Image (spheres, coloured by chain):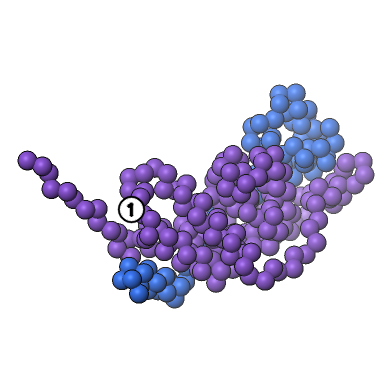
């Protein structure tokens, strides 16, 4: 006797929302730097999930697909909106004088990450520093240090070479370090 | 190796990807240059803080709008 064919059950809207909205929104928010654009992109991505999720049932590639769809939707959204004038981008490696020494004093940081991040203002400070990164560095920085993707995965997502990913990630980290330093450096007594 | 060269190599250094010879020269520099030691420690802390950053959260209003959009899509509205 043949087994009756079982039709795959569609996830409810609530299941789709709970399973994917927090992660999709976080990536979109960090890439786009504002709540409204991130909400638009999250909606776009979740609707794609509703339409196509059945093709990924039990498939380990779902997280990869979600990253790709979210990154593509965020980049497309950014292109659609009026391009914001970005401030001139200073190379963070310009903060060294001609003989290669630091141009400014460098002090140790007095911060314990776990304790610091429990304070809302510290998390907001870091989030705002990410928002202010130039887009060219922010995309790579978010995918690497927020999402934890490898350089090779980022290269594929953004259609870049691995060397370009590493260069942008390094400059993004230096800009972040320089933005956070005034807040976290020990005050000289 | 000077301070700028140290800064240029930090991505590979903290990622454990630096060639042994460059790794040794960089660490020798860090031992005798407190500003670079502080700079390197703060570069690592920046990465750590970002990796542990709590997720950006949807506002309740935005979450309600998204749920409504998903329900409308499933009803074929």
> Mark 1 packing: few (<14 Cα in 10 Å), some, or many (20+)?
some
Residue A41 place in picture, x, y as percent:
51, 65
Image quadrant holding the C terminus of chain A, namely bottom right
Tell me what hue chain B is rendered in: blue
Of the pair A74 and A131, the residue shown nearer to us: A74
With respect to residue A49, does B69 lie above or below?
below
In the picture as drawn, the residue positioned furthest to the right comes out as: A98
Image quadrant holding the N terminus of chain A, namely top left
User: Mark 1: which secondary structure?
Assistant: helix
Of the pair A64 and A2, the residue shown nearer to us: A2
Image point (55%, 44%), residue name: A149
User: Does residue A27 appear in the picture of this structure?
Assistant: no
Residue A94 place in picture, x, y as percent:
84, 50
Residue A9 place in picture, x, y as percent:
24, 56
Image point (84%, 50%), residue name: A95
Residue where numbered disc 1 is placed: A54
Image point (33%, 45%), residue name: A58
Which chain does tag 1 point to?
Answer: A
Residue A87 place in picture, x, y as percent:
78, 64
Chain identifier of the purple chain: A
User: Does residue A6 appear in the picture of this structure?
Assistant: yes
Image point (54%, 60%), residue name: A73
Q: Is residue A111 left or right of residue A100?
A: left
């Amino acid at each position: 006797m043949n087994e009756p064919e079982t039709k795959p059950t569609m996830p409810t809207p609530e299941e789709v929302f709970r399973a994917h909205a927090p992660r999709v929104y976080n990536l979109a928010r960090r890439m786009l730097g504002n709540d409204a654009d991130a909400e638009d992109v999250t909606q776009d991505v979740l609707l794609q999930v509703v339409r196509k999720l059945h093709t990924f049932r039990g498939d380990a590639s779902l997280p990869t697909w979600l990253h790709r769809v979210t990154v593509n939707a965020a980049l497309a959204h950014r292109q659609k909106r009026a391009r914001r004038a970005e401030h001139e981008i200073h190379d963070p490696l310009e903060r060294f004088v001609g003989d290669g020494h630091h141009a400014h004093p460098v002090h140790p940081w007095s911060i314990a990450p776990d304790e610091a991040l429990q304070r809302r203002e510290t998390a907001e400070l870091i989030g705002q520093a990410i928002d202010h990164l130039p887009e060219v560095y922010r995309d790579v920085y978010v995918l690497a240090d927020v999402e934890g993707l490898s350089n090779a995965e980022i290269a594929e997502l953004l259609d870049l070479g691995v060397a370009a990913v590493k260069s942008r990630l390094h400059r993004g980290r230096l800009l972040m370090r320089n933005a956070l330093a005034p807040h976290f450096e020990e005050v000289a007594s | 190796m000077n301070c700028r060269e140290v800064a240029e190599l930090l991505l590979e250094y903290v990622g454990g990807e630096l060639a042994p010879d460059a790794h040794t020269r960089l660490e020798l520099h860090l031992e005798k240059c407190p500003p670079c030691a502080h700079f390197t420690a703060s570069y690592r802390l920046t990465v750590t803080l970002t990796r542990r950053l709590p997720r950006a959260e949807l506002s309740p209003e935005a979450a309600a709008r998204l749920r409504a959009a998903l329900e409308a899509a499933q009803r074929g509205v």
